């Protein structure tokens, strides 16, 4: 009986040790290191992860949007504090939900919304509403599933276990180790070298843009209604609301403007670009800055593919915005000279979007 009890104690001890090792290796909740790059095993947990990572107080700027805004880093907005809440193909309703959750307790002075023409198509909602619905408040389910994902991944890729346990590096969590990309501490996203190389070789085309992003004959009033709800919440919570449409690669803009076979589908694009729409956004209280037609479009180094801006492209967006008096008035303390210095530093690197380190 005593021997059986000893065996039981040993088994329980080994099980506990194994569990602790797995928890350490999987790192399901990321790391407190300022250099860590983390990625949840399932993108539906991105919202919960980012909400947990939000500064509890003193946040000046919060950027909410799709993955097109993922590369904006806090150093571009100094001396203001900044967090990037972007990274997935949210619908307007989902953006409204994230806005409500993110500003419920944390009260940023300014929220920047990525407002793109395709958000206002019902086709975008139909394509993404289900797969991009965030999961909140299921900590134990997330923990269990994260560890299971690590075990499955380690069986297929044994080197992942070695990297997780014995190799020092910025990547934390199964998917970050596997893909060598993920979220920085400021919420911005670091794309992997292989991701960027492949995208630049194959996807910097107009065809990629129109295949990935739906068109439509006109703007949907249902989608606009969600933006109206955000504007109302911003007024109630004392938040300045800024809207930005980021650049697209030049070939994509030319296609939207001139391709006759796509003309009907580009109706939403033309309506979104109209003075009428700009005035409507301004009436809602959104200070809107449209960089869709910009010199940034002409340099492929500013893009990962046809519609995701690179880290260099993000800095050049900030440069361009600072040239606009309306934007400059909102952020008077951002130093254009410092921004130019960041641009030179990133331009001089062989892989500008791959800088590893704290924001």
Image (spheres, rainbow, N blue to C red):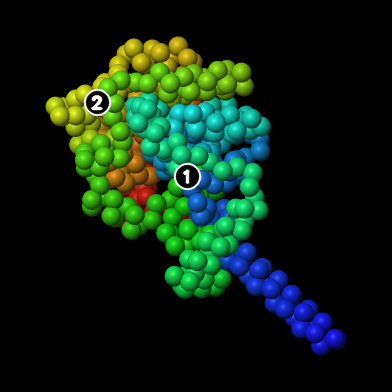
Residue drawn at x 19%, y 29% as measured from the top left: 262
Q: Nearer the viewer, residue 243 or 298?
A: 243
Earlier residue among tags 2 and 1 = 1
Q: Nearer the viewer, residue 201 or 330?
A: 201
Q: Position of residue 32 (x, y in %)?
A: 62, 54
Q: Residues within 10 Å of mark 1 (few under 14, many from 20)?
A: many
Q: Position of residue 206 (x, y in %)?
A: 21, 38
Q: Residues within 10 Å of mark 2 (few under 14, many from 20)?
A: many
For marks 2 and 1, give the CA distance: 30 Å
The answer to whether one can see residue 2 in this image is yes
Disc marking residue 121: none
Q: Residue furthest bottom?
A: 3
Q: Position of residue 269 (x, y in %)?
A: 28, 24
The answer to whether one can see residue 320 in this image is no
Which residue is under mark 2? 266
Q: Position of residue 28 (x, y in %)?
A: 59, 57
Screen quadrant of the N terminus: bottom right
Q: Residue furthest left?
A: 260
Residue drawn at x 47%, y 22% as measured from the top left: 227
Q: Is residue 67 left or right of residue 249?
A: right
Q: Residue furthest front?
A: 1
Q: Nearer the viewer, residue 103 or 184?
A: 103
Residue drawn at x 35%, y 27% as measured from the top left: 121
Disc marking residue 188: 1
Occupied quadrant, residue 343:
top left
Q: Nearer the viewer, residue 148 or 342?
A: 148
Q: Nearer the viewer, mark 2 or mark 1?
A: 2
Residue drawn at x 52%, y 71% as measured from the top left: 161
Q: Is residue 1 left or right of residue 296?
A: right
8 above or below 140? Answer: below
Label 2: which secondary element: loop
Occupied quadrant, residue 292:
top left
């Amino acid at each position: 009986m005593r021997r059986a009890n000893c065996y039981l104690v040993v088994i329980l001890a080994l099980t506990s040790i194994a569990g602790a090792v797995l928890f350490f290796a999987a790192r399901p909740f990321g790391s407190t290191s300022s250099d860590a790059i983390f990625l949840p095993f399932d993108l539906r947990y991105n919202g919960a992860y980012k909400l947990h990572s939000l500064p509890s107080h003193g946040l000046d700027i919060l950027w909410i949007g799709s993955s097109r805004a993922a590369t904006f880093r806090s150093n571009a907005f100094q001396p203001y504090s900044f967090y990037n809440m972007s990274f997935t193909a949210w619908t307007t309703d989902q953006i409204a939900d994230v806005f409500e959750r993110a500003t419920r307790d944390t009260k940023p002075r300014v929220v920047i919304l990525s407002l793109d023409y395709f958000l206002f198509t019902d086709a975008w909602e139909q394509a993404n509403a289900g797969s991009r619905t965030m999961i909140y408040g299921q900590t134990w389910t997330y923990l269990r599933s994260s560890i299971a994902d690590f075990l499955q991944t380690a069986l297929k890729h044994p080197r992942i276990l070695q990297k997780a346990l014995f190799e020092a590096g910025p990547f934390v969590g199964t998917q970050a180790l596997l893909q060598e990309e993920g979220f920085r501490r400021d919420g911005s996203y670091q794309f992997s070298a292989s991701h960027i190389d492949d995208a630049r070789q194959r996807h910097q085309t107009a065809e990629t843009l129109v295949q990935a992003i739906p068109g439509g004959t006109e703007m949907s009033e249902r989608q606009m209604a969600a933006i109206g709800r955000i504007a109302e919440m911003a007024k109630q919570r004392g938040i300045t609301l800024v809207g930005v449409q980021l650049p697209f690669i030049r070939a994509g803009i030319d296609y939207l403007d001139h391709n006759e076979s796509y003309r009907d589908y580009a109706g939403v694009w033309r309506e979104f670009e109209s003075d009428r729409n700009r005035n409507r956004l301004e009436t809602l209280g959104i200070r809107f800055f449209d960089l869709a037609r910009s010199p940034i479009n002409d340099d492929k180094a500013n893009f990962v593919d046809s519609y995701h801006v690179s880290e260099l492209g993000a800095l050049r967006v900030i440069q361009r915005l600072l040239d606009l008096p309306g934007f400059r008035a909102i952020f008077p303390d951002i130093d254009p000279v410092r921004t130019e210095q960041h641009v030179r530093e990133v331009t001089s690197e062989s892989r500008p979007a791959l800088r590893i380190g704290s924001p």
